[in-house]
Image (cartoon, rainbow, N blue to C red):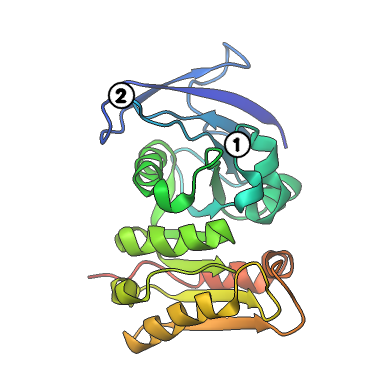
Amino acid sequence: MHTRQIFVQPLAMFFLSTFAITQLSSAQESPVAQVPGDYKVRFKVSAQNAPKMNYLLSLPADYTATGKPSPLIVFLHGGGERGNDLEKVKVHGPPKIAENNPNFPFVVIAPQCPEGSRWTYEIRVLKILLDDAIAKYNIDRDRIYLTGLSLGGYGTWNMALAFPEYFAAIAPMCGGGVPDEAYRIRDIPVWVFHGAKDKSNPLENNQRMVDAVKKAGGDVKFTIYPNLGHDCWTVSYNNPDLYTWFLSHRKAKK
């Protein structure tokens, strides 16, 4: 799959998402990426002292700009992939799979957390980024899925708690959240993953969230790997059942 660079110039203020795009690699190509392939997108919110949050974008082989909309996976990486090098975001999970398999049936958006920050500090920017992507690309709004590992596992829980109306299903891995807020995602199917021997982030941090979602009446399942430590994500993201499970869910109608 080919890779293009796209630069997103902000035109709106902090909570607006109207952007102009300039194609850096070829003046002849469309200013908006609407053909299958892998892209690097430079994204910045326009406001004083507002952060930038670049992201990887993968459009699957069957993606079309005007035809049937594609499901979307938003992937939040772990702590080791923070910074300004988007190549680091490809080392795990859906971005890695999408790069190697053009038939992976999802649009994948994988933002990069700034160095020294945490996803839980970047939730507002993530929302702006997601709103912009939904407006720009041909995405099925009833099939938006959220997943992340470690730092991104915490980000997954907290993004879903903050904006539950966006997601059809979520899959946090070796993370944790705020159990008192679990009622907010009782209508979102959740599949949680953790290694029983995790010394970096104890199993109990996810267990508390699982218990709280169940208590709130939510649909949650918990996969515990008895012989794994912190890295529960490699086996989980390589399991095709995860993606079948994602696609089996659409956003609940109110």
254 in relation to 94, above or below: below
- Occupied quadrant, residue 138: top left
Judging by the rendered image, the residue that carries numbered circle 1 is 83
Q: Work out whether residue 73 or residue 122 is closer to the camera in this orientation and state it.
A: 122
Judging by the rendered image, the residue that carries numbered circle 2 is 48
Give the mark nearest the N terminus, 1 or 2. 2
Q: Residue drawn at (65%, 67%), measured in percent from left and top?
A: 200
Residue 122 on image: x %, y %: 41, 45
Q: Residue drawn at (43%, 48%), measured in percent from left and top?
A: 139
Q: Residue drawn at (60%, 67%), measured in percent from left and top?
A: 243
Q: Residue drawn at (54%, 57%), measured in percent from left and top?
A: 152
Q: Is residue 102 at all visible to an observer of this figure?
A: no
What amino acid type should be assigned to the residue bearing mark 2? Gln
Q: Dot 2 surroundings within 10 Å: few (below 14), some, or many (20 or more)?
A: few
Q: Work out whether residue 197 or residue 236 is closer to the camera in this orientation and state it.
A: 197
Residue 25 on image: x %, y %: 63, 17
Residue 170 on image: x %, y %: 47, 67
Q: Work out whether residue 242 or residue 77 is closer to the camera in this orientation and state it.
A: 77
What amino acid type should be assigned to the residue bearing mark 1? Gly
Are circles 1 and 2 on residues that touch, CB within 8 Å?
A: no
Count of residue discs:
2
143 in relation to 8, above or below: below
- SS for tag 2? loop
Q: Quadrant of the C terminus?
A: bottom left
Q: Is residue 124 at all visible to an observer of this figure?
A: yes
Which residue is most to the top? 27
- Occupied quadrant, residue 39: top right
Residue 86 on image: x %, y %: 64, 36
Q: Dot 1 surroundings within 10 Å: few (below 14), some, or many (20 or more)?
A: some
- Occupied quadrant, residue 224: bottom right
Taking 186 as reference, is 53 left or right?
Answer: right
Whole-Å distance between the Cαs marked 1 and 2?
21 Å
